[in-house]
Amino acid sequence: MAVEQRLDQLEKRNKRLTVALTMTVVAMAAVVTMAATGERYK
């Protein structure tokens, strides 16, 4: 496998992991925000 192919694979994987991490952080922030501002019903 050529070095350029390996670099392309690493760049694609890095981008996917970065997107996944960003989405996870955004989802966690949304959950924390909803929990902090949510109304309580009886």
Image: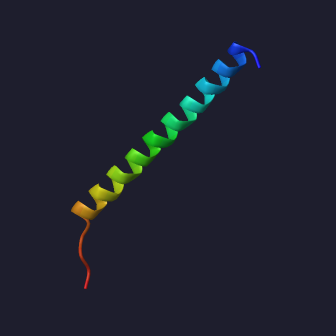
Residue drawn at (27%, 55%) of the image: 33
Q: Residue furthest front?
A: 1
Residue 20 coordinates in the image, percent (x, y): 51, 42
Is 2 placed left or right of 42 in the picture?
right
- Closest to the observer: 6 or 23? 6
Is 4 placed left or right of 23 in the picture?
right
Q: Quadrant of residue 6?
A: top right
Q: Give the position of the C terminus as an image quadrant.
A: bottom left
Residue 23 coordinates in the image, percent (x, y): 46, 44
| Numbered-mark total | 0
Is 13 placed left or right of 25 in the picture?
right
Residue drawn at (26%, 66%) of the image: 38
Q: Residue furthest right?
A: 1
Q: Is residue 42 above or below residue 16?
A: below
Residue 17 coordinates in the image, percent (x, y): 53, 37
- Closest to the observer: 35 or 12? 12
Q: Is residue 5 above or below residue 16?
A: above
Is 11 placed left or right of 4 in the picture?
left
Residue drawn at (27%, 64%) of the image: 35
- Closest to the observer: 3 or 37? 3
Q: Give the position of the N terminus as an image quadrant.
A: top right
- Closest to the observer: 17 or 31? 17
Q: Is residue 6 above or below residue 35?
A: above
Q: Quadrant of residue 37?
A: bottom left
